[in-house]
Image: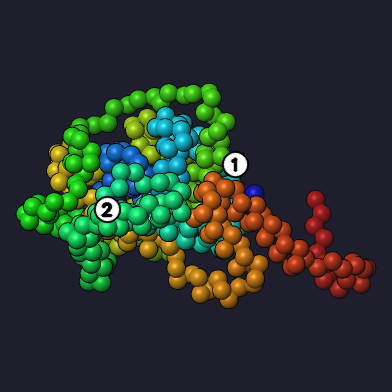
Amino acid sequence: MGLDLSLPLDDRWLPKSVLCLRDYNLTKFSKDVIAGITVGLVALPLAMAFAIASGLTPQAGIYCAMVTGFLISAFGGSKTQIGGPTGAFVVVVSGIVAAHGIDGLFMCTMMAGVLLVVLGATSMGSAVKFIPRPVVVGFTNGIAVLIASTQIKDFFGLQLAKVPGEFWLRMKALAASSPTWSARATLLAVCTVAVMLLCRAFSNRIPGPIVAMLGATVAANLLKLPVETIGTRFVGGIPSGLPHLVIPHWHARLVTGLLGPAFTVAMLGAIESLMSAVVSDRMSNDRHNPNVELIGQGIANIVSPMFGGLPATGAIARTATNIRSGAQSPIAGIIHALTLLCVLLFAAPLASYIPMAALAGILMIVAYNMGEWREIPQLLKLTKTDISVWLVTFGLTVFADLTVAVEAGMILAALLFITRVANTTTVSQVTDEYIEDGRIHILQDK
């Protein structure tokens, strides 16, 4: 992969946070403060919801959003990227926890972080853009379906002790428990979805998730609705104070089994973070550095488990909120992390009153938004090969295993790339007449 010589050698490996300080001023800082606080409030309910959906405690999501949000902004290659836990990791994280436990998740996250650093350091960040669109859309469609299916229980207040990990078994168990649905929980979840949609319709700058979560929490407690809350599911709620720095225990017997999941986490993280960075570039008229971005993502994922966090990547929705709120530099992302820290220190006990149905409603919107359903009509206009690749990737993601889907997707991506290169390559005889006419340029070392 060639080097971008349009930038000075030193600048190519500097984080955006350092480059942006060269012309930083008080006006930009004030805008960053407003944007950072806004996106921090948006990130709060999402971080808790992603952690709970992954089979972890809500504080794990806050720790992750706080630590990785700070590190990705400080060491990444995008000016306005916001990092943290995302929906893309919900399915793979829950699978890792079920198979290998919390220690296995922490090991896997750190291994994925190392892979991301290696990808960035070897200038492989630019190669991610060559992954075919049908593969990416197949992943996101499948993950969206899986996330939505994991939230059906809390959305309808079903009485189900444990939700199975496999899709078909999960849907069968949910159908069997449908008579236990709660009208109050369902109404609360529907109202949460409605509030988020209304906020978006009224203004993109209104933090829909936090408004919906606060409204549902106040309504549930004022009306004394008998619905499950964070406090009733997680005894003690969310503890106040800073997370403890702990070096995860490494088990040699788990390393081999975690290589596949670590590769999956790294690839999903690379794809989503660089997709988010491209969106950020378009909205802010900037250009990210993909290699530095992957290094920043890798550092964040290496450190996250040391504070009890889960895998993280760039978050498209939060990044868009950050830009719409006026962010000027990575300082906004750092302030977003500090906002979460303040919430953790001074308002953590209040999280016990948040209804699980409200978080399920928020995640239903997240699942729909990340699904890229509008891409499907465009995909159907492509070749039969592209459509087949999309369907295979989608099917493997939903019905098989995300690790298998990622590995198969990478193989399909490579085969598609080779096929297209072969189809666009012309082989012809080079004669002296071609050279004399200037139709062929021969490059010689001088």
Which residue does the numbered mark 2 point to in the structure image? 158
Report how many numbered discs are placed on residues in the image: 2
CB within 8 Å, label 1 to label 2: no
Residue 326 is at least partly visible in this image: no
On screen, residue 15 above or below 383: above
Residue 119 appears anywhere in the view: yes
* Residue at the image position 49 percent from the left and 43 percent from the top: 265
In depth, the one of 85 and 189 nearer the eye is 189
User: Are there few (<14), some (14-19), or many (20+) residues within 10 Å of tag 1?
Assistant: few
In the current view of this chain or complex, which residue is farthest to the right?
Answer: 432
Q: Position of residue 1 (x, y in %)?
A: 64, 49
Task: Tell me the element at label 2.
Answer: loop
Q: Nearer the viewer, residue 44 or 6?
A: 44
The amino acid type found where label 2 is placed reads Leu
Disc 1 secondary structure class: loop
The residue that mark 1 highlights is 122
Rendered residue at 61%/73% (across/down): 382
Q: Is residue 384 above or below residue 97?
A: below
Mark 1 or mark 2: which comes first in sequence? Answer: 1
The colour scheme is: rainbow
Q: Residue 164 in the image: state x and y as whole percent.
A: 40, 46
- Residue farthest along the left direction in this orientation: 222
**Alpha carbon of mark 1 to alpha carbon of mark 2: how far?**
49 Å
Q: Position of residue 130 (x, y in %)?
A: 60, 57
Residue 9 is left or right of residue 370, and the answer is right
- Label 1 sits on what residue type? Thr
Image coordinates for residue 199, horizontal then vertical, percent: 22, 67
Identify which residue is drawn at 30% across, 48% down. 160
Q: Is residue 134 above or below residue 382?
A: above
